[in-house]
Amino acid sequence: MITGRKIPDNATTVAEPGNSRTLVITGAGILGIYLWWLIYRQLPATASWITYGLFQIGKGSHLGESVNFFFYDTPKVMMLLFLVVFGVGTIRSFFTPEKTRAILSGKNEFIGNILAALLGIVTPFCSCSAVPLFIGFVTAGVPLGVTFSFLIAAPMVNEIAVGLLYGLLGWKIAAIYMGTGLSVAILSGWVIGRLHLEKHIEDWVTEIRADTDTGNDERLTWNDRIIYGWEAVKEIIGRVWLYVMIGIAVGAGIHGYVPEGVMASVMGKGAWWSVPLAVLIGVPMYSNAAGIVPVVEALLGKGAALGTVLAFMMSVIALSLPEMVILRKVLKPRLIGIFILIVTGGILLVGYLFNMVI
C-alpha cells in the first residue's frame, strides 16, 4: 500500500478553465471500463484454450485443472487489482497522513476506535508503514487503543481484498470479511485502550514532539486525482504482483491436486481444532491480502469451512512475523505479546462464530 507518498509534482492547484478536459477524461474512463469488461468476459474461454488447446493437456486431469485455474485466475486477479487499486487510489488523494491524524485526534475514544478502523480501510497504509504511522499518531496525541484499531484494520480489512473477494466469491463473503475484520479491529483497539499500556511504548517514540505542520492544503483537480490513482496502480501492483502470482500458483495446486476430503478434514466445521490450526499455519506466512485471496478461493472450493478460511486469511494478513519485527521497533515485547493475544482471540472468535452460523 502507498506509504505517505507525495502528491504528484505535476499536480495543479487551480481549477482548469472549461469542462472540455473533464469530458475527455470521463469519456476515456467509460471506454476503458467497457474494454475492461469485454476482456474480462473472455478470460474463461481463453484459459481453456491455452490449457487444453495450446498445451494439449487432458481435460479432467489434475495437471489440467491446475493449469486452467492458473491461466484463468492470474489475469482475472490482475484485472480486478487494476480496477480496485485505481479507484481506491483516486479516493486516497483526499487523505493525507496529516488529515488522518487530525481526524483521529481529540475524539471520544470509542468513536475514535470506529473512525480509526474505517480509515484503516481507505487510507494508503499497511503493516509496512507501522513505524512512521505509530510515531505520527502517538506524537499527535491519538490514544494508544485508537492507534491500534487503525493498525489492525489497515492490513486486515484491506480494500483490495474486499474488491477481490467481491469479484471472486460474491458480495456476501466480501461483506462478512469486512464486517468481521472491522469488529476485530474496533474491539481489539478498545480493549488495548482500557488496559492503559502506554508505558510499554519504546521511550524514544514518546520523546518525539508532535510535528506542527498542518500539511498540504492544495486543492487538486479531478485530473490530478486520476494521476494519483494511476500512480497508485503502478506502485501497488509493482509491489504485489509477485505475491499474487505465488498465491495463485498455490491456489492452483490446491485446486488441482488436493482432494476435497483432505481440506474438509483439516479446515472443516467438524474439528474443533481446525480454527486454531489455521491461525497457527497462517502466522508464519507472509503475504498481502491480494496474494492470499486466490488461496482462499481454492480452499473454499475444496470444502474448507468459511470461518476457518477467514481465520486463516486474517492471521496471514494481520499477525505475520515481518509485521511483528517492524512493530518491535516502537513497542516493548510485553505490548506486542498483548497485541498478538487480543488479535488472535478476535480472529478465533470470528472463525468459530461463522463456522457455527454458516
Image (cartoon, rainbow, N blue to C red):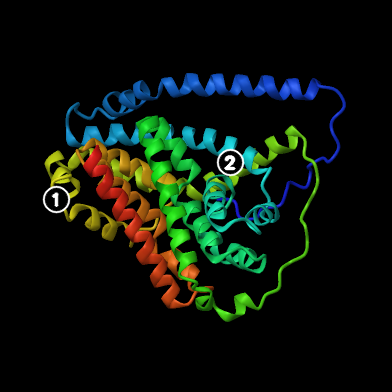
Residue at 46% over, 65% down: 192
Disc 1 crowd, CA 10 A, few/some/many (<14, 14-19, 20+)? few
Side (left or right) of 296 relative to 201: left
Residue at 61% over, 41% down: 89
x and y, in percent, of residue 355 in the image: 23, 43
Residue contact between numbered discs 2 and 1, judged by CB atoms under 8 Å: no
Q: Using the numbered discs, state the Cα–Cα distance from disc 2 to disc 1 in whole angstroms.
A: 41 Å
Residue that label 1 marks: 271
Specify the quadrant of the image occupied by residue 262. Answer: top left
Side (left or right) of 222 relative to 195: right
Q: Mark 2 or mark 1: which comes first in sequence? A: 2
Residue 254 in view (yes/no): no
x and y, in percent, of residue 149 in the image: 50, 57
Indicate the amino acid at tag 2: Val
Residue at 59% over, 35% down: 87
Disc 2 or disc 1, which is closer to the eye? 1
x and y, in percent, of residue 215 in the image: 76, 55
SS for tag 1?
A: loop
Disc 2 crowd, CA 10 A, few/some/many (<14, 14-19, 20+)? many
Residue 233 numbered mark, or none: 2
Residue in front for this viewpoint, 277 or 7: 277
Q: Is residue 60 above or below residue 9?
A: above
* Residue furthest to the front: 108
